[in-house]
Structures are given as structure tokens and as C-alpha cells.
Amino acid sequence: MQKGIEKVLVSEEEIKEICKRLGEQISKDYAGKKLLLVSVLKGAVVFMADIMRNITCDCEIDFMAVSSYSGTKTTGVVKFKKDLDINPEGCDILLVEDILDSGITLSYLRGVLIDRHAASIKVCAFLDKPANRQADIKADYVGKVIPDEFVVGYGLDYNEKYRNLPFVGVLSPEVYSNK
Ligand code: IMP
Ligand code: MG
């Protein structure tokens, strides 16, 4: 097992199956619409790269960057760090997220996009950690519901490390317990 990883939670094989399933569903639901995939940097880039290649209807992609985390804890305050390049007005937006945890990040972004007159806004989250939800938001497409554990890999980080793991694993508590 990789150093610092307690166990594998989502294997590479399961990730493939999830992306195929969600891609098929999204392709059906958005056929003929003006689909704009909006990914939240940096954690969701790996999932974005996989999900977009499983979508067969026309779509565009764009990125936003926000931050609300310090180590393994959400600060509850969302900071806007990079805006969209494409004007979202009239677009059917699908927010592509690595993980829906407290929901504070996505509910903030949803608010921003509503103000900019997006035609519709839905959420596609690779992982859903419902135990810690604080904002009133749910994902319309979910890869996998997971327990309340801090996970890394497949884009998800701990202090910018582990994003390159090809699977999702649970971080060993000793990695962050002494910090
Ligand atoms: P939320 O605003 O609490 O829903 O958090 C959303 C963001 O926090 C995610 O997009 C991740 O970047 C980060 N995050 C939440 N839980 C985890 C985790 O278990 N591991 C790594 N990052 C996480
Ligand atoms: Mg993220």
C-alpha cells in the first residue's frame, strides 16, 4: 500500500465504471441542450477529464477556482480565486466536483451562477460525503456515497499531495494527527 494510505476506497476499475455510468446518463439528459461543464479547480480536474470523455452530446468546458479548506478542515468561508472564461448566461451548467462534503463551496458557486442567468444548474459529484452536509444542496449525479473519512487521490489532495494517485484512498490519521 502507498505510504500514508490506510485503504483503497474506490479502485481504478470502479472509477471507470462510475464515469461510464454517469457519462451515459448525462449524455441522455443533455442531448440538444447547451451543456457547459464547469469544474472546480484543482480537485475535480481528473474527474472532469474522465467524465467529459464519456459524454457524447455537444458540450463546452470551463473552470473556476475557489478555496475553503486548510488541511483537512473547511474554514466555512469560500474565497473566489479564478472566474469562468465563458459567459454562463443561457447555458445549461453542470458543476463537476470531486467531492460534495459540507456543500458550502457548491452552494456558493450555484448562487453566483444563478445571478449570472444560467438557464439551468445541476451538480455532478464524483464522491458524496453526506454526513458533514451544512448547506442545502444535493448532487443530481453521484459517483459514490462515502462515509465521513478524509480521502485523497484521483485529484483529491491533502495539503496539495496525493492528487496523482489513480485511485481514491483513506488517508492514515497519523499523517495529519500531529499537525
Ligand atoms: P465542501 O465545500 O465542504 O463541500 O468541500 C468541497 C471541497 O473540499 C472539495 O471540492 C474538496 O476539494 C475538499 N474536500 C472535502 N472533503 C475532502 C476530502 O475528504 N479529501 C480531500 N478534499 C476534500
Ligand atoms: Mg474541489
Image: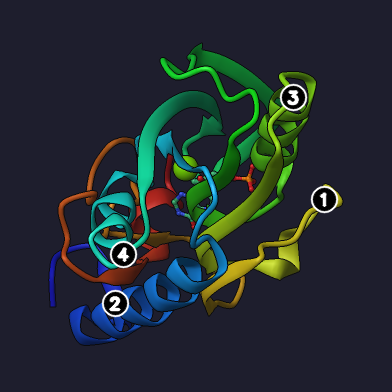
**Type of residue at label 2?**
Ile
Identify the residue position indicated by label 2 in the image. Answer: 15
* Separation of marks 2 and 1 at Cα, in angstroms: 27 Å
Q: Which residue is drawn at 59% across and 35% down?
A: 91
Question: Which numbered dot is residue 56?
Answer: 4
Structural distance between the alpha carbons of marks 1 and 3: 25 Å
**Residue 132 percent across, percent down from the top left:** 73, 60
Coordinates of residue 29 in the picture (x, y in percent) = 56, 68
- Residue 173 x, y percent position in the rendering: 42, 63
- Badge 3 amino acid: His
Q: Residue at x 45, y 19 (%)?
A: 86
Kindly identify which residue carries mark 1. Answer: 134
In the picture, measured across the screen, residue 89 lies left or right of residue 150, that is right
Q: Do the residues labelled 3 and 2 touch (CB within 8 Å)?
A: no
Labels 4 and 3 touching (C-beta < 8 A): no
Whichever of labels 3 and 2 marks the residue nearer the N terminus, that label is: 2
Asked if residue 167 is positioned above or below residue 179 in the image, the reply reads below
Q: Quadrant of the C terminus?
A: top left
Mark toward the viewer: 2 or 1: 2
Q: Which of marks 4 and 3 is nearer the N terminus?
A: 4
